[in-house]
Image (tube, rainbow, N blue to C red):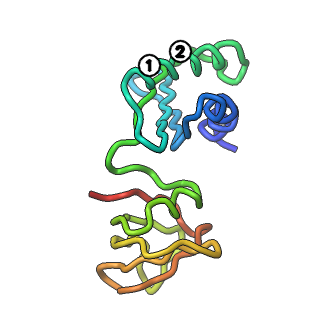
Amino acid sequence: MNKAQEIEDFLTPVATREKVEIVDVQYVKENGDWVVRVFIDKDNGITMSECENMSHIFGAFLDESDILKESYVLEISSPGFNRVLKKEETFKHFIGSKVKIHTFNAINNQKNFLGTLLDFKDGKAKINDVTNGTIEIEFLNIKKANVEL
């Protein structure tokens, strides 16, 4: 398990208690500093004050734990317009939206797909890809997926 996933797993119960969803976590080194980025959302969207509040809450939990040994910068924000799709439930929420999907393994000699998400069931995303038309992509084959404007 990578450190970003470990941080997400650690903070998810806190997020659930606070009635927010963790959309994604990034743990990266930038300009010599470790940065923990936590993208959060809820049904009606997330406000700046809610991000600030969650920064205090997540920061306190991370500081009290031994999950991060080195110093870090904590950033909390909304997922934005090009929201990452990481969970099966999230795919279902964005049926009808335009999505970009990158796969681990090629499907019809293609690894990058762009089109409308038509459905998500039985562990498969069905999209109307601009290149290949309607195609099903196994969830486990999805390397990265985003909502597109």
Residue hosting label 2: 56
Q: Position of residue 101 (x, y in %)?
A: 42, 66
Q: How many marks?
A: 2
The residue furthest right is 66
Circle 2: residue type: His
For label 1, the residue is 52
Residue at x 40%, y 36% (from the top left corner)? 78
Which secondary structure, mark 1?
helix
Density class for disc 1 (Cα within 10 Å; few <14, some 14-19, many ≥20) is some
Query: What's the mark number on residue 98?
Result: none
Q: Position of residue 83 (x, y in %)?
A: 40, 49
Q: Residue furthest front?
A: 44
Quadrant housing the C terminus: bottom left
Near mark 2 (Cα within 10 A), the count class, few <14, some 14-19 or many ≥20, is some
The percent position of residue 128, horizontal first and vertical second, equals: 37, 80
Locate the N terminus by quadrant.
Answer: top right
Residue at 37% x, 64% y is: 100
Q: Amino acid at mark 1?
A: Glu
Secondary element at tag 2: helix
- Answer with left or right where residue 51 lies relative to residue 86: left
Height in image: 80 above or below 142?
A: above
Residue at (53% x, 15% y) in the render: 56
The reply to whether the C-beta atoms of the residues labelled 1 and 2 are less than 8 Å apart is yes
Q: Is residue 76 left or right of residue 17?
A: left
Which one is nearer the viewer's eye here, 65 or 107? Answer: 65
